[in-house]
Amino acid sequence: MTDQVYHKVDNRHPEALELEELGVKWLAEPMCRGGAHVVLVADSGRGYLDTELIPQAAITPQAARSFGAALAFTHAGGADWYGQPPLGYSGPGFMGRSSLDLIYEDDGRSWGEFFAVHRIMPNLPPALANGSIDRAGAAVLEKLAQRLRDGVFDVPEPELVMSRASRIHGDLWTGNIIWAPSRALKRFPSLAGRGDNRNLPLPEVVGVLIDPAPSGGHAESDLAALGVFGQPYLEEIYRGYNQVSPLASGWQERINLHQIHMLAVHANLFGGSYGSHTVDLARQYL
């Protein structure tokens, strides 16, 4: 193991680091089949997690396309139901400092019902309490939740996903991808990051996943999260993904729908304009 590590400590919520470690390993499994690079765990224990440092480089259009294709193979690692935790984990869920519902037995929920009940609505009470969402905004979210529960927005997972749900990162904003020179990544499986280009060399720069909030989810949620705070060459990521695992028709129109969860989490945690932004996006789907 390298002696250069990122050392993370959380004595208040040590389960969060256990979840992160198991999530990193869960997301790493598809690397052997072309999935995206995932940071390597160097050491761990109760309340701490060491991951190997990843050198950084500048993203390129080729790197973005290649990452999109590799992410499709990560998602195709699959999950048996929406909300499924990484294998071996039985504690509470976390997304940053917010709680995240994990579902430990298959409850048969469709994606829309899951997304409403376990992703959007748990963030409403704290956002009401901090004033970032008012009662009128809450009514908008409640109407959207009903439409989600009714299955209005349920669509199939992307083509490569053979299971009921995708294996998603869950917190895939731009800060949770490190763009790294591929020549410096020596200890990864040979097919890591290659997507369907098994016989071609890796691009000079590849994307490496870090800091997940992992669970079974819809692949479109990860793809939508990439655009919440801006991602260079985002359209190239989408292009690379769609070339190997086409998304269901109308996916572009659902991007804002999937972004509502991440924005609702921010309204929960930070208040302010995140609440009105959450409500504005929800209103588009009524």
Image (tube, rainbow, N blue to C red):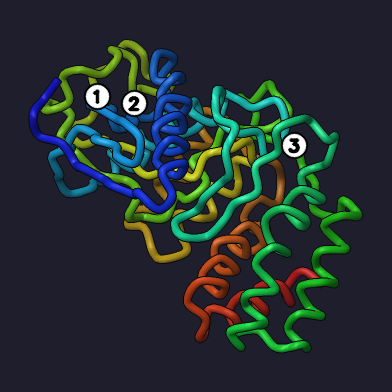
Outermost residue to the right: 150
Badge 3 element: loop
> Hey, what amino acid is under mark 3?
Pro
In the picture, measured across the screen, residue 157 lies left or right of residue 15, that is right
Query: Do the residues bearing badges 2 and 1 touch, measured as CB atoms within 8 Å?
Result: yes
Alpha-carbon span between mark 2 and mark 3 = 24 Å
Q: On screen, 252 above or below 76?
A: below
Q: On screen, 189 above or below 98?
A: above
Local crowd at mark 1 within 10 Å, few (<14), some, or many (≥20)? many
Badge 1 element: loop
Spot occupied by residue 61 in the image (x, y as percentages of width and height)? 29, 45
- Residue at screen point 60% across, 68% down: 264
- Residue at screen point 64% across, 40% down: 217
> Hey, what amino acid is under mark 1?
Leu
Q: Quadrant location of the N terminus?
A: top left
- Residue at screen point 83% across, 40% down: 109
Camera-near label (2 vs 1) is: 2
Q: On screen, 152 above or below 269?
A: above
Alpha-carbon span between mark 2 and mark 1 = 7 Å
Spot occupied by residue 19 in the image (x, y as percentages of width and height)? 47, 37
Q: Which residue is mark 2?
A: 193
Q: Quadrant location of the C terminus?
A: bottom right
Q: Which residue is mark 3?
A: 156
Q: Earlier in the sequence, mark 1 or mark 3?
A: 3
Give the number of the disc on residue 202.
1
